[in-house]
Image (tube, rainbow, N blue to C red):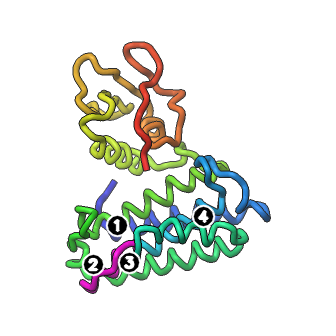
């Protein structure tokens, strides 16, 4: 997937519209229905996606102006925001998604080229990473609504970038695995993989979904034959 932030914003626009269309098809009262994420309702998921847009808008504002604007003002603000908004009717949730996306898109459009190189403290990345972070949130949490959108709907580019990100972020003391995505010439390794480590192969989407806890890996293969090895919880 391209890392050009402005090109990624087109992907964010499209992904957000897909999410909103799914939300528009929800029945009245669905905000209280359980989501696939343990302990979360549909309202939790939708509110989190909206508040995440606001938090990333803060980071773009920081990068553009140089005025410190943390993603969340306090350590507890993320959870408090989700809890405060989760019970709102679906229509209000949808309006919130649209408004927060528009603010985020406006903030991205206002970024001078140099501002994308701004180093974000605590993230260890430049502001150019922010559109990808937003796209990942929208696509993954769309799956978390449990209303027909699955990892099979992810684009090839999105699935591959997400898979590579999960692998690169794995700690050295995590599970030692060799991953063989279909169509990828070179294997990906996690942890301290050796010649004797399990080899897990399959479609890129299925591998990414399994490692992200959004798929059961039923269509993945394991060598030597056996069960899929346990992997740590992702995000």
The local secondary structure at tag 1 comes to helix
Per the image, the residue denoted by label 1 is 130
The residue positioned 24% from the left and 63% from the top of the image is 125
Q: CA distance from mark 4 to mark 2?
A: 26 Å
Q: Nearer the viewer, mark 1 or mark 4?
A: 4
In depth, the one of 83 and 55 nearer the eye is 83
Contact, CB < 8 Å: mark 1 with mark 2? Answer: yes
Contact, CB < 8 Å: mark 4 with mark 2? Answer: no
Q: CA distance from mark 3 to mark 4?
A: 19 Å
Q: Give the residues drawn in magenta, as a range.
A: 56-72
The residue positioned 45% from the left and 65% from the top of the image is 12
The local secondary structure at tag 2 comes to helix
- Quadrant housing residue 73: bottom left
Work out whether mark 4 precedes mark 2 in sequence or the reverse, and give the earlier one. Answer: 4
207 vs 31, left or right, is: left
Mark 2, Cα crowd under 10 Å, few <14 / some 14-19 / many 20+, is many
Q: CA distance from mark 3 to mark 1?
A: 11 Å
Kindly identify which numbered label has been placed on residue 63: 2
Q: CA distance from mark 1 to mark 4?
A: 19 Å
Mark 1, Cα crowd under 10 Å, few <14 / some 14-19 / many 20+, is many
Work out whether mark 3 precedes mark 4 in sequence or the reverse, and give the earlier one. Answer: 4
Per the image, the residue denoted by label 3 is 58
The local secondary structure at tag 3 comes to helix
Q: CA distance from mark 1 to mark 2?
A: 10 Å
Work out whether mark 1 precedes mark 2 in sequence or the reverse, and give the earlier one. Answer: 2
Q: CA distance from mark 3 to mark 2?
A: 9 Å
The local secondary structure at tag 4 comes to helix
Number of numbered tags placed on the structure image: 4
Q: Is residue 159 above or below residue 121?
A: above
Per the image, the residue denoted by label 4 is 46
| Residue sitting farthest toward the top | 225
């Amino acid at each position: 997937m391209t890392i050009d932030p402005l090109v990624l914003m087109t992907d964010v626009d499209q992904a957000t519209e897909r999410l909103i269309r799914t939300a528009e098809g929800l029945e009245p009262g669905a905000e209280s229905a359980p989501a696939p994420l343990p302990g979360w309702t549909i309202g939790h998921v939708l509110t989190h996606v909206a508040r995440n847009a606001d938090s990333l808008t803060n980071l773009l504002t920081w990068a553009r102006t140089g005025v410190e604007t943390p993603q969340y003002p306090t350590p507890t603000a993320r959870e408090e925001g989700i809890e405060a908004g989760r019970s709102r009717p679906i229509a209000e949730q949808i309006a919130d998604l649209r408004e927060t996306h528009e603010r985020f898109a406006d903030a991205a459009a206002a970024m001078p080229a140099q501002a994308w190189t701004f180093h974000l403290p605590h993230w260890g990345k430049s502001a150019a990473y922010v559109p990808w972070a937003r796209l990942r949130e929208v696509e993954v949490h769309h799956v978390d609504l449990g209303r027909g959108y699955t990892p099979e709907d992810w684009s090839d580019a999105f699935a591959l970038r997400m898979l590579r990100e999960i692998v690169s972020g794995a700690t050295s003391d995590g599970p030692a695995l060799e991953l063989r995505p279909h169509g990828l010439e070179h294997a990906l390794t996690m942890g301290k993989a050796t010649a004797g480590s399990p080899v897990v192969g399959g479609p890129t989407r299925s591998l990414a979904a399994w490692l992200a806890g959004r798929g059961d890996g039923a269509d993945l293969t394991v060598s030597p034959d056996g069960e899929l090895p346990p992997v740590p919880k992702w995000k």
